[in-house]
Image (spheres, helix red, strand yellow):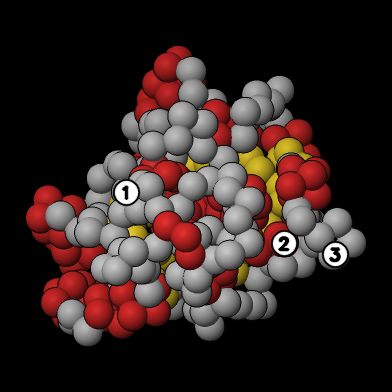
Amino acid sequence: MPRCIAFHSYKGGTGKTTIACNLAAMLSLKGYNVSLLDLDVYAPSLHAYFDYSPKKWINDLLFENSDLNEIMVDMTSTLTRSASDKTKKIGRLLVGFSNPQKDEIYKLEGSIKTANANIQLLRRFVQLREDLISDYESDYVILDTSPGIRYWSINSLAVADVLFLTLKFGDLDIEGTIKMANDIYGSFTKFGSKSFLLLNLVSGYCIPRTYLLGSQSTNKSTSGVPAAEEKEGTTIEIQTFQNELGSNTFLSDQTKMDLISAIPCYCDIQFQKKEFLTVLQHPDHPFAKQLEQLAMTRQIVV
């Protein structure tokens, strides 16, 4: 059964776009057809992430100025160019981009002033999801949403089957996430949606010097860190790390949501000048291994 997965957060800077893009690529590499949509309409970034400027945007579709086949861009060639095994059958990756121009963002904001307009736009969101599943045979529709409780993020969450509430392990993020979960997420779960917490950029596990992107070393430890550079106390044991965080039930108790994954802060990814699909470029990186684990969880597998 196809699934629609929305990545959401209380505030920006939680890395939800990076995770959404890498999960989309990982699922495509596993043979699934994936449609990735930039619905962070106030601060869209997928055009910069993929270094692509389309002729038509999601904005045009919402205002009925284009058809779906004009806005969905086939980025599968990105996977085939980067995949290490060229003979392996992969799925299709389609991406829908949101227009970053200020005038277009203001136009979207102005379009929701009446209740009738709100209903019409919600219907278009629902139709967009259904068309991607039926006409494009998408196994997954992945939504990168706007942070916070705003009209466009609420609409995005309303059409999703699975909600990933992404946060960092800081007081402001935790307090805001708990409040948001209690205020709005219960409404979605009443109608069958499943919601989960996804911790990202967790401090204390950063490895800016022990794993160098582009390293050709074949002598690696089980942690993904080159053995020659691994020192006592710096080894990353991903499973142990997840178990430790999983034993802390405070967030789950407060939000009534299970923790589906906890991803350490990897400085070699976070502070790259140009970040792009680590799961393709560096499949042995610990971050890529975490995304593979996420892609294989029962909450995601169709």
> Mark 3 belongs to which amino acid?
Lys
Label 3 secondary element: loop
Q: Is residue 1 left or right of residue 70?
A: left
Residue ID for mark 3: 89
Q: Which residue is mark 1?
A: 14
Vertical position of residue 181 compared to residue 191: above or below? above
Label 1 vs 2, first from the N-terminus: 1
Instruction: Tell me the SS state at disc 1.
Output: loop
Which residue, given by chain and number where applicable, does mark 2 sit on? 29
Residue 145 image position (x, y, % from top left) = 43, 47
Query: At which x and y percent is residue 51?
Result: 62, 28
- Label 1 amino acid? Thr
Q: CA distance from mark 1 to mark 2?
A: 25 Å
Q: Earlier in the sequence, mark 1 or mark 3?
A: 1
Q: Residue at position x 70%, y 35% from top?
A: 71
Q: Residue at x 58, y 65 (%)?
A: 219
Q: Is residue 255 left or right of residue 78?
A: left
Image quarter of the N terminus: bottom right
Instruction: Tell me the quarter of the image containing the C terminus.
Output: bottom right
